[in-house]
Image: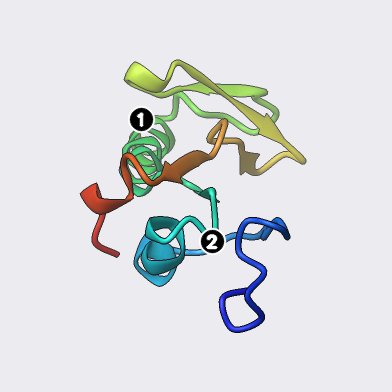
């Protein structure tokens, strides 16, 4: 959009890391970037691993307790939903470096 001079007139939608999109968010070509929150992903993974090791997460369970994230839902027998993705905006994208 930048090269075509269409920033602000055509919406850009997709997933990307904050570092890849910083220049476009900062120059208002992209309003926001959506991605999982790596802090929450690691936090959830630790709780799931602990529940698995302790035997409190069993086959057939539909949720797993994940501390401050609450109960995370399980689907398809083995997939755990982290929840809503994180939204990087002009206000917060500078706080991330990955």
Residue that mark 1 sits on? 54
Residue that mark 2 sits on? 29
Q: Quadrant of the C terminus?
A: bottom left
Question: Quick check: 11 left or right of 50?
Answer: right
Outermost residue, front direction? Answer: 5
Residue closest to the eye, 65 or 29? 29
Give the percent coordinates (x, y) of residue 83: 56, 31
Give the percent coordinates (x, y) of residue 95: 22, 48
Instruction: Choose top left, top right, bottom left or bottom right for residue 72.
Output: top right
Residue closest to the eye, 25 or 34? 25
Residue shown at the point (63%, 75%) measured from the top left = 5
Question: Counting other residues with Cα less than 10 Å from the Cα at mark 1, is it few (<14), some (14-19), or many (20 or more)?
Answer: few
Instruction: Choose top left, top right, bottom left or bottom right for residue 59.
Output: top right
Residue shown at the point (70%, 56%) measured from the top left = 11
Relative to 66, is 87 above or below?
A: below
Q: Please, what secondary structure does the residue beneath circle 2 have?
A: loop
Give the mark nearer the N terminus: 2 vs 1: 2
């Amino acid at each position: 959009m930048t090269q075509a001079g269409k920033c602000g007139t055509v919406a850009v939608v997709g997933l990307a890391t904050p570092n890849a999109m910083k220049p476009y968010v900062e120059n208002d070509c992209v309003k926001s970037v959506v991605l999982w929150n790596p802090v929450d992903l690691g936090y959830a993974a630790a709780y799931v691993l602990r529940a698995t090791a302790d035997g409190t997460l069993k086959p057939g369970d539909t949720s797993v307790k994940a501390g401050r994230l609450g109960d995370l839902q399980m689907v398809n027998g083995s997939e755990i939903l982290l929840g809503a993705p994180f939204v990087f905006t002009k206000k917060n994208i500078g706080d991330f470096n990955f």
